[in-house]
């Protein structure tokens, strides 16, 4: 009876599917490590495919090679060193970061790629060394140790407790055994197995690609630690995947913008000159034909001007701005913006923008306390101006569709507050809101609901927010319209420090280049 009792309790606490689910959860850590390494390889591929770098390397221009490597170094913060080697291994150019690799805090990955269209045998080759934080890998090793310990206990648990000595003792204390086994099953085994089963169930949708799953974390034991690590891993994996995907798409969009700007700009001047020449050379006295020629000239010049403006916006998008971050009190900055917008809407209105803002009830709800952050004041002002103007335009268009032109168009409220380790800035309006179809692609380039819009404003807004280490999303406002929610990290957070390091690295590279 003692042997049967111990075997039953053991089977309850160590069911085979628990170990299988733990192994599957451990595989998610391995996927994270694989994603980090794959991202580094993609970065190396992007650098190796740079035509200018390949050209100067093949031409043997040492100084130009070093300059190109330094430029790429600034664009990829995870780099430790960049080298250009020929097929014999001779170094044609090299650039390294000043800080050496810290084995306790970083892990490195070396990637070797042929430059441009070079073959795998002839070269030249790009040799890139990347560094990644050691924290995620350490957590993976910790999880491996936990799973190994679980399997070891699972294998040896019964042999340990069904030993002859313990069997005799249980035979003498049979009555106490029944009570202890019942308490162990109820108080210890059932809660633990239930929590492990919940964690194991959460791994199934994760394995299918759903990174929004989270497990409820209770207790301070190893299972609770595993649950917290699991949730943290999914959050970081989801953010990393979204960031990599956004940067990849941004690169493709910028290439498209450069191509469009080039293809549109080239024929504009010949078209305009040709029409102007036709207008100038016409010496006839037919008034109707002269009027047609004059109208044609005006239409062409107007449309060419519009196309030149579009080309300018495409070129500006292809050179997206870089945030120059510095310590700033976000609360003080928003109060200054409140005064700035108020001054522009009072008194005489000299621009379409001021006339637009004067027709809405714009209000700021900012706490009086300090909100330390790292910001680029000019860039963040651009973000706030763009979002507020979009809200005002949506209110204006809704009023026009309703046939109402008098009175205020509606309300726009800018509210800020601290939430956890970040600040949240909400821009709400009581307009028609944003449809679900548009909301999913709202921050993609060339997506606009305005007749004369290019769809680049909100894309640049998102890029600026990402440069600040934050996020932006469009949702439904409690006022009934649209809400743009901007999250910015606190000055002392890891996200803020990482954003500042990227900004400083870019500044140093720009100073060296100049």
Image (cartoon, rainbow, N blue to C red):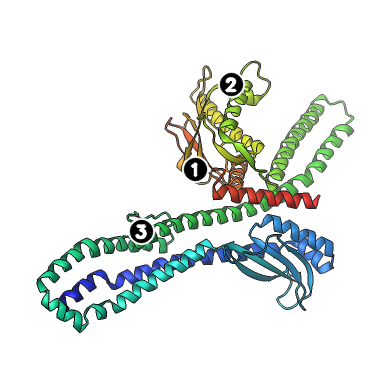
Q: Quadrant of residue 173?
A: bottom left
- Residue pointed to by mark 1: 439
Q: Quadrant of residue 175?
A: bottom left
Residue 439 at x, y percent in the picture: 49, 43
Residue shown at 81% from the left, 38% from the top: 272
- Residue pointed to by mark 3: 224
Q: Alpha-carbon neighbours of circle 3 within 10 Å: few (<14), some, or many (≥20)?
A: some
Closest to the camera, between mark 1 and mark 3, is 3
Residue that lies at the very extreme toward the bottom in this rendered image:
164
Residue shown at 50% from the left, 38% from the top: 424
- Residue pointed to by mark 2: 358
Residue 335 at x, y percent in the picture: 57, 28
Q: Earlier in the sequence, mark 3 or mark 2?
A: 3
Residue shown at 47% from the left, 64% from the top: 139
CA gap between label 1 and label 2 equals 27 Å
313 left or right of 216? Answer: right
Q: Quadrant of the N terminus?
A: bottom left
Asked whether residue 240 appears in the rendered view, the answer is yes
Q: Nearer the viewer, residue 6 or 234?
A: 6
140 left or right of 380? Answer: left
Q: Is residue 166 above or below residue 478?
A: below
Q: Earlier in the sequence, mark 1 or mark 2?
A: 2
Question: Is label 1 in a helix, a strand or a loop?
Answer: helix
């Amino acid at each position: 009876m003692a042997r049967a009792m111990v075997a039953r309790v053991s089977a309850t606490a160590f069911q085979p599917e628990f170990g299988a689910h733990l192994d599957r959860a451990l595989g998610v850590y391995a996927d994270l490590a694989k994603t980090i390494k794959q991202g580094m390889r993609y970065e190396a591929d992007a650098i190796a495919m740079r035509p200018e770098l390949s050209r100067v390397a093949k031409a043997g221009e040492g100084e130009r090679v070093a300059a190109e490597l330094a430029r790429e170094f600034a664009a990829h913060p995870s780099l430790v060193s960049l080298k250009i080697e020929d097929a014999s291994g001779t170094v044609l150019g090299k650039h390294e970061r000043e800080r050496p690799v810290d084995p306790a805090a970083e892990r490195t990955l070396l990637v070797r790629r042929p430059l441009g269209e070079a073959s795998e045998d002839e070269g030249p080759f790009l040799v890139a060394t990347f560094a990644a934080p050691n924290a995620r890998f350490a957590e993976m090793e910790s999880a491996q140790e936990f799973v190994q310990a679980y399997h070891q206990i699972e294998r040896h648990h019964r042999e340990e407790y069904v030993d002859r000595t313990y069997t005799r003792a249980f035979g003498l204390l049979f009555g106490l055994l029944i009570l202890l086994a019942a308490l162990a099953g109820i108080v210890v085994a059932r809660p633990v197995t239930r929590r492990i089963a919940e964690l194991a169930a959460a791994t199934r949708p994760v394995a299918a690609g759903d990174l929004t799953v989270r497990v409820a974390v209770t207790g301070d034991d190893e299972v609770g630690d595993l649950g917290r690590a699991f949730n943290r891993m999914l959050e970081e994996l989801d953010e990393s995947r979204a960031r990599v995907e956004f940067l990849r798409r941004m690169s493709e969009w910028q290439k498209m913008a450069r191509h469009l700007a080039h293809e549109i700009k080239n024929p504009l001047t010949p078209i305009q000159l040709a029409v102007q020449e036709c207008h100038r050379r016409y010496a006839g006295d037919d008034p109707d034909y002269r009027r047609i020629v004059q109208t044609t000239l005006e239409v062409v010049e107007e449309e060419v001007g519009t196309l030149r403006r579009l080309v300018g916006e495409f070129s500006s998008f292809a050179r997206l701005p870089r945030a120059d971050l510095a310590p700033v009190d976000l609360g003080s900055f928003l109060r200054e913006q409140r005064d700035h917008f108020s001054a522009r809407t009072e008194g005489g209105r000299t621009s379409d923008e001021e006339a637009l803002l004067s027709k809405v009830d714009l209000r700021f709800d900012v706490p009086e306390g300090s909100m330390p952050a790292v910001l680029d004041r000019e860039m963040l002002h651009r973000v706030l101006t763009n979002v507020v103007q979009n809200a005002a335009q949506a209110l204006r268009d809704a009023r026009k569709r309703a046939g109402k032109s008098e009175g205020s168009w509606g309300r726009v409220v800018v509210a800020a507050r601290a939430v956890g380790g970040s600040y949240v800035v909400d821009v709400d309006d009581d307009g028609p809101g944003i449809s679900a179809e548009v909301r999913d692609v709202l921050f993609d380039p060339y997506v606009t609901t305005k007749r004369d819009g290019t769809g680049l404003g909100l894309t640049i807004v998102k890029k600026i927010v990402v440069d600040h280490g934050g996020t932006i999303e469009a949702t439904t406002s409690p006022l009934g319209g649209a809400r743009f929610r901007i999250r910015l990290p606190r000055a002392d957070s890891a996200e803020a420090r990482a954003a500042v390091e990227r900004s400083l690295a870019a500044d140093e590279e720009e100073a060296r280049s100049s």
